[in-house]
Structures are given as C-alpha cells and as structure tokens.
Amino acid sequence: MTTDPAELVTEFCARWAAPNVETILSYFTEDAIYYNIPMAPAEGVAAIRTLLPMMLNGMEGIDFVIHRQIAHGDLVMNERTDVMRRTNGARVELPVMGVFEVRDGRIAAWRDYFDLATVTAGLA
C-alpha cells in the first residue's frame, strides 16, 4: 500500500472492483469518518465495518471510473462515476464527487457527494 495521498486514493478506489471488506478497511485510520452525504456518517472503523456489507449486498463489485483527480497535500478530490455491478447482471452508474483526507498514509475522512435518488432508482 502506497502512502502518497493521490496514489493511495487511486489504489483504494481500484479495490472496490473486487471488494474485500478487510482490505478496504485497511486503508482507514481507526478514527476515520466515512460520510455518504445524503446519509448519516459512519464514524470509526467499527462503524465502517458494519456499513460496508450492507453497501455491498447484492454487488459483484463497484468500478470507480475516475474522470479527474486533484491532490493538495493530504487532501484528494476526485470526480468519478461509480459503476455498481449487481449479482443479477444489472448495472447502476452513479456520478460522484469524492473528498478524501489522508493522515499518516491512511484515509482519515472520506466524503462522497451524490444523488441518492439515482442509487435507489437503479437498485429497485
């Protein structure tokens, strides 16, 4: 695992294509906050560990297609399309703006901004 913030976020995003909860969790600090802006934040690795299986339920994986990414120090922002691949063969494409704060080579905060209606309509 790299410690360069931009490379770390790129590597982290690629892990979602074939998600393994423990591997994904290894990218976070113990006190990390994961905030899907339309929903309540998950605070701490234990809360994130509880959230991930619910997010991944019925998914083969999620392809994070990064269109643009910028980094300034420990702050990384990317504009991307998350392509959720369902186990039933369906795909949901979700435009996302992601903001990552990196501390000591791990993700300390992750905020994703997206339209929840796009997700719920695609997963129905």
Image (cartoon, helix red, strand yellow):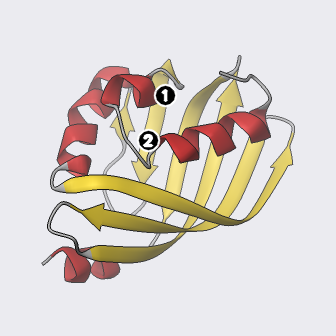
Residue at image coords 59%, 30%:
107
Task: For label 1, count other residues whose C-alpha is less than 10 Å away and answer few (under 14), some (14-19) or many (20+).
Answer: many
Residue at image coords 53%, 59%:
64
Question: Mark 2 = which residue?
Answer: 34
One can see residue 120 in this view: yes
| SS label for mark 2 | strand
Query: Which quarter of the figure has residue 84?
Result: bottom left
Quadrant showing the N terminus: top right
Residue at image coords 41%, 76%:
93
Rendered view: 39 above or below 89:
above
Residue at image coords 69%, 34%:
8
> Which residue is nearer to you in this view: 119 or 92?
92
Amino acid of disc 1? Ala
Give the alpha-carbon distance from disc 1 to disc 2, as whole Å.
Answer: 7 Å
Question: Mark 1 = which residue?
Answer: 32
Amino acid of disc 2? Tyr
Q: Position of residue 118 (x, y in %)?
A: 33, 81
State left or right for residue 24 relative to residue 105: left
Query: Which quarter of the figure has residue 89?
Result: bottom left
Asked if disc 1 and disc 2 are in contact, CB closer than 8 Å, the reply is: yes
State left or right for residue 93 relative to residue 104: left
Rendered view: 124 above or below 21:
below
Rendered view: 51 above or below 84:
above
Q: Position of residue 106 (x, y in %)?
A: 62, 23
Q: Position of residue 119 (x, y in %)?
A: 29, 74
List the single residue furthest toward the right.
72
Task: For label 2, count other residues whose C-alpha is less than 10 Å away and answer few (under 14), some (14-19) or many (20+).
Answer: many
| SS label for mark 1 | strand
